[in-house]
Image (tube, rainbow, N blue to C red):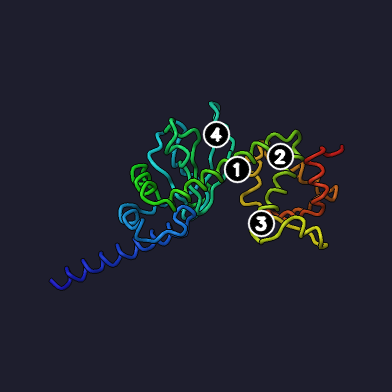
């Protein structure tokens, strides 16, 4: 009898510990930022953290979207496949980011892209019914949700601007400068501050060069070849995934005016 009671106690402790991990994971995401845990306690009870392996598909284009996914750990990619099996990477999503949010209130509730794991990842899924109930009950959560939607629109606009660049070099330079600006913003600095001191700025590619090439809608060999040419001309220096921006002003002029052959 004692062994049975002890086993029940162990199960309860494990369940409580697991639920605590879910609550801590959700509390660390932008969607639940600033919210009292009591407001989303029921979500922690009803949901679980799903382990997703690298290369695993979470949703195919055309699948119904029944809620949102929140990335707790790892990296996912939004892929667009052609009938021939070729694909382009439209966007990379990391820890704390959400997918499926733009389909919750829209007239269309099916995925327009394929969601695939780039690395082993952990994801929490919240149903549409649960999410909408929480949003209507809490203005702060609604504000966080609208901020996520706004950031998604901003990211899409940046991507359109990136892909509208005429040459491969302009695309690459624009991408590197965007990474630099994001990095400086996180550090509380601006490009103007950096220009006042003599320093070389470096950025690190978040994924492999092959994935970055897909993001920029160009063949992997063309991406590598252009990096080599830019390095020869003193614009950058490449060390694995780390790229040193030796001439940020030259890169910026090239994006705006076009690089001279």
Q: Are marks 2 and 3 in contact (CB under 8 Å)?
A: no
Task: Say which mark, if any, is on residue 35.
Answer: none
Q: Residues within 10 Å of mark 1 (few under 14, many from 20)?
A: few
Question: Residue under circle 3?
Answer: 185
Q: Quadrant of the C terminus?
A: top right
The span from disc 2 to disc 3 (Cα, nearest Å) is 32 Å
Classify mark 3: helix, strand or loop: helix
Question: Residue under circle 1?
Answer: 154
The span from disc 4 to disc 3 (Cα, nearest Å) is 30 Å
Question: Residue under circle 2?
Answer: 221
Q: Residues within 10 Å of mark 3 (few under 14, many from 20)?
A: few
Q: Position of residue 164 (x, y in %)?
A: 70, 34
The span from disc 4 to disc 1 (Cα, nearest Å) is 20 Å
Question: Residue under circle 4?
Answer: 80
Residue drawn at x 61%, y 50% is 207
Residue drawn at x 79%, y 46% is 252
In the image, which is nearer the foreground, mark 1 or mark 2? 1
Counting residues from the N terminus, which is met first, the one under dot 4 or under dot 1? Answer: 4
Judging depth in this view, the residue of 32 and 233 nearest the camera is: 32
Q: Quadrant of the N terminus?
A: bottom left
């Amino acid at each position: 009898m004692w062994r049975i009671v002890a086993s029940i106690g162990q199960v309860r402790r494990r369940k409580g510990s697991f639920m605590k991990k879910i609550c801590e994971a959700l509390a660390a995401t932008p969607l639940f930022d600033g919210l009292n845990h009591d407001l989303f306690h029921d979500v922690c009870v009803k949901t679980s953290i799903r382990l997703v392996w690298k290369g695993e598909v979470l949703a195919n284009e055309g699948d119904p979207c029944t809620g949102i996914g929140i990335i707790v750990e790892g990296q996912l990619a939004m892929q667009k496949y052609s009938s021939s099996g070729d694909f382009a990477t439209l966007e990379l999503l990391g820890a704390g980011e959400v997918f499926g949010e733009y389909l919750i209130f829209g007239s269309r509730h099916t995925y327009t892209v394929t969601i695939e794991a780039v690395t082993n990842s952990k994801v929490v899924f919240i149903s549409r019914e649960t999410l909408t109930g929480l949003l209507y009950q809490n203005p702060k959560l609604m504000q966080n949700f609208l901020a996520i939607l706004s950031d998604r629109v901003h990211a899409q606009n940046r991507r359109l601007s990136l892909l509208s660049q005429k040459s491969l070099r302009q695309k690459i330079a624009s991408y590197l400068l965007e990474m630099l600006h994001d990095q400086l913003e996180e550090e509380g600095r601006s490009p103007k501050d950096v220009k006042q001191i003599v320093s070389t700025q470096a950025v690190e590619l978040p994924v492999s060069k092959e994935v970055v090439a897909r993001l920029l809608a160009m063949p992997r060999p063309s991406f590598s070849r252009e990096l080599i040419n830019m390095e020869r001309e003193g614009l950058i220096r490449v060390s694995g995934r780390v790229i040193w921006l030796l001439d940020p002003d030259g890169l910026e002029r090239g994006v705006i005016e076009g690089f001279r052959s």
